[in-house]
Amino acid sequence: MVELGSSEIQNFLQQLGDRYPGAGRLYLLGGSALCLLGSTRRTLDIDYSLAAPDEDMDQLQATVDALAMELKLDLEAVPLEEFIPLPEESETRHRRVDQFGGITVYVYDPYSLALSKVARGFETDLEDVLFMLGTFALKS
């Protein structure tokens, strides 16, 4: 498996924005989100969720899948709401990263990310929560 840092994730996002002709939103979760926030710890995969108009969702997902295969990246769609109860107003706390073509990229709500890390409870997850606390005080 390829370890990913910020530059590899940015490269994937740029290529996705170049290839996908429509508009949509990509929410990063887990280690890939933390890489874009400045964590020096590399990740093995890109966990994400997508949002697009219903008629475009299949094409967006197909573009993500094809690019991941081409670049030999491990990408995983994560329905976070199936793993943890999402905190109230979580959708208002996503952090915008950048625009790549028609794709707006966000880091998922920090409260939700921290909750998912604590729920899993690996030592590296707890280190990630400490990193997030140092990066932003988890304020709305």
Image (cartoon, rainbow, N blue to C red):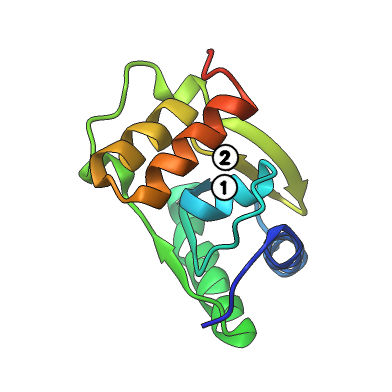
Q: Which of 34 and 24 lies nearest the eye of the viewer? A: 34
Circle 1: element type? helix
Residue at the (53%, 13%) spot, across then down: 139
User: Where is residue 80 drawn, in percent x and y?
Assistant: 32, 44
Q: Quadrant of residue 86?
A: top left
Residue drawn 52% across and 22% down? 93
The reply to whether dot 2 and dot 1 touch (C-beta < 8 Å) is yes
In this rendering, position of residue 42 left or right of residue 108:
right
Up-down relation of residue 89 to residue 31 (above or below): above
Q: Is residue 6 above or below residue 88?
A: below
Element marked by disc 2: strand
Residue 94 visible in the displayed image: yes
Give the residue displayed 48% in from the left and 42% down from the top: 128
Mark 1 nearby-residue class (10 Å; few <14, some 14–19, many ≥20)? many
Q: Nearer the viewer, residue 56 or 16?
A: 16
C-alpha separation, residue under disc 2 versus residue under disc 1: 5 Å
Closest to the observer, 20 or 80: 80
Residue beneath disc 2? 107
Amino acid at pointer 1:
Ala
Residue 33: which disc?
1
The mark tally for this picture is: 2
Q: Earlier in the sequence, mark 2 or mark 1?
A: 1
Most extreme residue toward the top is 140
Mark 2, other Cα within 10 Å: few <14 / some 14–19 / many ≥20? many
**Residue 24 visible here:** no
**Residue 121: which quarter of the image?**
top left
Q: Amino acid at mark 2?
A: Val
Residue at position x 61%, y 77% in the image: 67
Residue 91 falls left or right of residue 70: left
Q: Position of residue 78 (x, y in %)?
A: 36, 54
